[in-house]
Amino acid sequence: MNKMTPSPSFDETPDQAARKAWMSVLAKSKSEDLNAAITSYGALPGFDWLRRPEIGGVMVRGRMGGTGTAFNLGEMTATRCSLRLESGEVGHAYVQGRDTRHAEQAAIVDALMQGPNAALVQATVLGPLTEMLAARQITRAEKAAATKVDFFTMVRGED
């Protein structure tokens, strides 16, 4: 698996792991990138709101070294929504920040991925978004690597 695909847990089905992966891509994508990808998909189906976009705060938790005891790191603003497409598929979204349009579009893509056009959505929306996220991650890693300092110890002439 690549770094953009979360590893499945032991009690997770393959469908759940796949949905977790595309939900992660949707949440991490920039709003303008998601909008451009959806525009390339074409006309979107109609939908009814199950839960209109709501803005609120969520507690962010962390662990030292990834294995330590969990602690509250702080709060983050998030937007969530749920909708049902005319064809019956239900989509949900949770995105960082206050962008209600981002949450709406992510929920639409989530619902479309559960329908008969999932392969087309994968190719036109999620594929390009995944590539953009991977490129952004590489650029970020290169910038971090450029600032890396290697410390070494020189041996003195003493024994």
Image: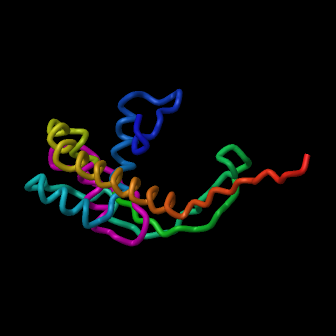
Residue 139, quarter of the rendered image: bottom left
Q: Where is residue 102 in the image (x, y as percent from the top left)?
A: 30, 64
Does the magenta-highlighted stretch encompass residue 17? no
Q: As drawn, which residue projects farthest toward the left?
A: 43
Mark count: 0
Identity of the residue drawn at 32% across and 69% down: 100
Q: Position of residue 35 (x, y in %)?
A: 21, 63
In the image, the segment drawn in magenta is 82-109
Q: As drawn, which residue projects farthest toward the bottom?
A: 98
Q: Is residue 40 left or right of 67 when viewed as pictured?
A: left
Q: Is residue 37 left or right of 74 when viewed as pictured?
A: left
Foreground of the two, 33 or 41 = 33
Q: Which colour scheme is used?
A: rainbow
Image height of 118 relative to 65, above or below: above
Quadrant containing the N terminus is top left
Q: Where is residue 105 in the image (x, y as percent from the top left)?
A: 25, 59
Q: Where is residue 135 in the image (x, y as percent from the top left)?
A: 33, 54
Does the magenta-highlighted stretch encompass residue 84? yes
Q: As drawn, which residue projects farthest toward the front?
A: 157
Identity of the residue drawn at 32% across and 63% down: 30
Q: Is residue 96 left or right of 37 when viewed as pictured?
A: right
Residue 36, quarter of the rendered image: bottom left
Residue 112, quarter of the rendered image: top left
Foreground of the two, 153 or 103 = 153
Identity of the residue drawn at 51% across and 57% down: 145
Q: Is residue 59 left or right of 50 when viewed as pictured?
A: right
